[in-house]
């Protein structure tokens, strides 16, 4: 895993975070980007998960 990026989004009364991580494919060795929008409390779990 190479880069991590986190952006905070505020929509109405909900506070959301968009997390983007770069994941290396075990088959080809190419990097892909995986992004998700979630609550700020869940960001560390998302980034630490392989």
Image (tube, helix red, strand yellow):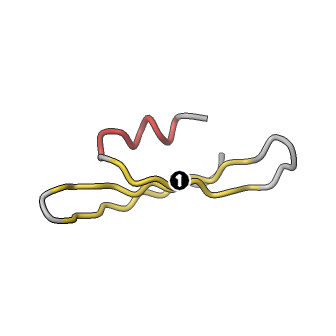
The relative height of residue 10 versus residue 43 in the rendered view (above or below) is below
Answer with the quarter of the image where residue 16 lies. bottom left
Q: Residue at x 63, y 53 (%)?
A: 22
5 relative position to 30: left or right: left
Answer with the quarter of the image where residue 17 lies. bottom left
Residue 19 image point, x, y percent:
45, 54
Give SS at disc 1: strand
Residue 27 image point, x, y percent:
86, 43
Q: Which image quadrant: the C terminus?
A: top right
Crowd around label 1: few <14 · some 14–19 · many ≥20 (10 Å): few
Q: Residue at x 50, y 42 (%)?
A: 47
Residue 39 image point, x, y percent:
30, 46
Number of disc labels: 1
Q: Which image quadrant: the N terminus?
A: top right
Residue 21 image point, x, y percent:
56, 52
Q: Residue at x 52, y 35 (%)?
A: 48
Judging by the rendered image, the residue that carries numbered circle 1 is: 4
2 relative position to 7: left or right: right
17 relative position to 30: left or right: left
Which is more toward the observer, 35 or 1? 35
Q: Residue at x 87, y 49 (%)?
A: 28
- Name the outermost residue toward the left: 13
The relative height of residue 9 versus residue 24 in the rendered view (above or below) is below
């Amino acid at each position: 895993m190479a880069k991590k990026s986190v952006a905070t989004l505020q929509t109405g009364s909900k506070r959301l975070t968009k997390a983007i991580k770069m994941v290396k494919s075990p088959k080809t060795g190419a990097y892909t980007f995986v992004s998700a929008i979630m609550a700020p409390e869940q960001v560390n779990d998302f980034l630490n998960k392989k």
